Image (cartoon, rainbow, N blue to C red):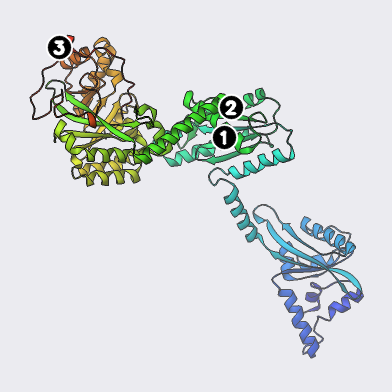
Amino acid sequence: MSRAASRMAFSGPPDITRELALLRPHGPGGDAPGAELAALRDIIRVLPGAVTLQDAQGRFLLVNDAAAAQFGVPAAQLLDCPPTAALPSEALNQRRAVGRTLLASGEGLVCEEQVGCGRSLRIFRTAHRPVEIAGASLLLSNSADITDQKQLEQALFERAYFDELTGLPIRSVIESRANALLQDHPDRRFALAFLDIDNFKHINDYYGHSIGDALLIEVARRLGLELRGSDTLSRISGDEFLILLNPIESQSEVNDDIAFLQQRLRAPFYIDGSEIFASASIGISLYPEHGRSFETLRQNADVAMYQVKNATKGGAAVFDVAMEREALARMKVEQSLRLAILDKRFCCAFQPKVDIRSREVKGIEALVRLRDDNGVIQAPGTFVDLAVELGLIDELTHLVLSEIMKSIDLINDNFGASVSISINVAAKQAGNPKFMRSFSEALEATGCPERFIVEVTEDAFVAKSHFQSEILPMLRRLGVGISIDDFGIGYSSLSALADITADEIKIDRSFITDIHKRPRSQGILKAIETLSEALGMTVIAEGLETFEELAYLQTATRIRYAQGYYFSRPIFLEDLKPTLPISREGRKPQPARLPEQARPSAPRSSGQRR
């Protein structure tokens, strides 16, 4: 090594320099101690850890290769720099200042140092230790690059505490911040706002999950732009967000802030060429009025949000005690429903689909009913939507099929062994391949799958789900029929219908009610009839209740089949008799009733059949 090269690594006052010069070789061959010291010098130079030595004035006396690379400055430049001159980088100036402080106190230190910025930022863990050489106090520093470790730690931290999709804090973070407020500032008022995007499932189904994810990201961005630095926005699940507004002065201030957020969300979102409109239902709870713990405040904001969602959607409401009572009543119904499924307290009623000209029974629809704790039969409107919401509908549908097969002999004796049996499947189920595969297997296990018709609403056909591409062929292979239920009140997508190979369309009762008095409904009915004939689908009129409605269908349309109270109310298995007032294939048709013999007028059913 030349003298110039050696000088790049060692510098300092004469006494210290003499000590450090011992590390240099004494000649070409060198004596044994000189050879050992030369080896030590080379070891220090190539150590992977960055090693520096500086004096109390801040002069660098030793800089090895790793240290020179750490700071991006040649060792000679550092060794030549006077203690009063500025060093080439802020990191070096900080190193010098830390060294002076530690040597003055005689203490060591382990710390993290940052060198560079942006993508070139590197992080080092540095151990500083005061030492004495030749009677001088010096600071020996050793640094190790921990950039990759810190990046991994940051990634793990973000995965643990931040939502991967939106980058927002998760629930535990906002809960921790709220609890800190409750503990450190118990007199400070704040608010929690529970936000749920309306109809997000429909957006997800219709546009696809990638568009749904992009919408969530945009919603999070818009909400975040309007919040203060002291506020916290968190995504706590799928389409649900929680906002901590801190601090607040009054409820009116919170109402104004939330109204502004809602206004921002109502502006259209432009995602992947689609213009999407979204709104949010928001429930608000205030501290300390509505609770003194995070969980109580969150639950009350949740209750208020569901009040909005069940009413008008797209609005906001502040929690009150009346909402809590309603929530408790809902919880009671939920518990009752879960117990009813567990105890199998459901039963089936059957309503015939009748040929309006021959009065023969074409098929029957199985309608699920619930017996409450007192044995009273509950209509499906009180529990079916709740069962879908709670994720209990799959088990309930399997129970209906099981009840049918237990009573198949009684059904055959009363309605005929050739009539079709219709079972309702919710749109959410119809788009779920896992459920539909298990349900198809159950239908196949009956030994007569071709006898069954699956009734689904229009939603299942127009949504971008697996129904048409995967589930419809699965049912077709078994010979199971497909029926579009409640046609006319959903999306009624004609372009979607063109791709559907359903067997029947059931026209919603809203078109059939007083059809003989409503010219506009008559025109719509004829259009649906023509469309169905073109697509090869059988038309069934739902909700037929009066002779006048029947007479219109018989004389003014080509519709052959109808279902409703005019022919029969839903019939429970225990009420089935060997002979019904409605004829079926193989029995002599009963004569049509005259107008004066028709069933007396009665309030119409709610339309909830399931």
44 sits to left or right of 571: right
Q: Is 273 above or below relative to 144? A: above
Residue 153 screen position, x and y as percent: 62, 56
Evaluate whether residue 464 shows in this view. no
| Place of residue 17 in the rendered image (x, y in percent of width and height, measured from the top left) | 87, 75
Residue that appears at 22% across and 18% down: 566
Q: Residue 328 versus residue 424: which sits nearer the camera?
A: 328
Give, as a three-letter code, the residue at label 1.
Gln
Q: Quadrant of residue 403?
A: top left
Q: How many marks?
A: 3
Can you identify the residue that label 3 sits on?
594
Occupied quadrant, residue 290: top right
Q: Earlier in the sequence, mark 3 or mark 2?
A: 2
Query: Residue 251 location, x and y as percent?
Result: 66, 24
**Mark 2 residue element:** loop
For marks 2 and 1, the one nearer the N-term is: 1
Q: Please identify the quadrant where the C terminus is shown.
A: top left
Which residue is labeled 1 in the image?
Answer: 299
Q: Tell me which label, 3 or 1, sits earlier in the chain.
A: 1
User: Type of residue at label 3?
Assistant: Leu
Q: Which residue is mark 2?
A: 319
Q: Is residue 151 left or right of residue 133?
A: left
